[in-house]
Amino acid sequence: MKLYVGNLSKGITKSQLSELARPYGSLVTLKVAVDPTSGQAKGFGFIEYSCVEEGRAAIAGLDGRDVDGLALIVNEAKPKAHIPSPMER
């Protein structure tokens, strides 16, 4: 199950997000969105667990949790919207 994690601090690292996520289950993937120009976190990321039960446990445990003075927003990630290329229009 893939989760969206929002309202992260701009200074969060992948290892810090991993520490928050690991108690809820087996991580498949973990990503902190980073601005390519500044290298600073954009304030959101994604966590993927090996099963739905672990993902639900992470939502219950992390959504609203205070991290660095910010209340996390954690929910099931929505599929990325398809944006048609000029060739498809």
Image: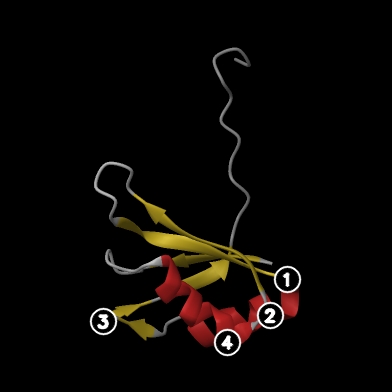
Q: Nearer the viewer, mark 1 or mark 3?
A: 1
Q: Residues within 10 Å of mark 2 (few under 14, many from 20)?
A: many
Q: For the point 65% across and 75% down, which residue is it?
A: 55
Q: Which mark is residue 23?
A: 4
Marks 1 and 2, how far apart at CA: 7 Å
Marks 1 and 4, how far apart at CA: 13 Å
Marks 2 and 4, how far apart at CA: 9 Å
What residue would you read off at disc 1? 50
Label 1's element? loop
Marks 4 and 3, how far apart at CA: 21 Å
Q: Quadrant of residue 25?
A: bottom right
| Mark nearer the N terminus (2 vs 4) | 4
Q: Position of residue 56 (x, y in %)?
A: 65, 79
Three-letter residue code for mark 4: Pro
What residue would you read off at disc 3? 69
Count numbered badges in the picture: 4
Q: Nearer the viewer, mark 1 or mark 2?
A: 1
Q: Residues within 10 Å of mark 1 (few under 14, many from 20)?
A: some
What residue would you read off at disc 2? 54
Three-letter residue code for mark 3: Gly
Three-letter residue code for mark 2: Glu
Which of the image's four quarters has the C terminus?
top right
| Mark nearer the N terminus (4 vs 3) | 4
Label 4's element? helix
| Mark nearer the N terminus (1 vs 4) | 4
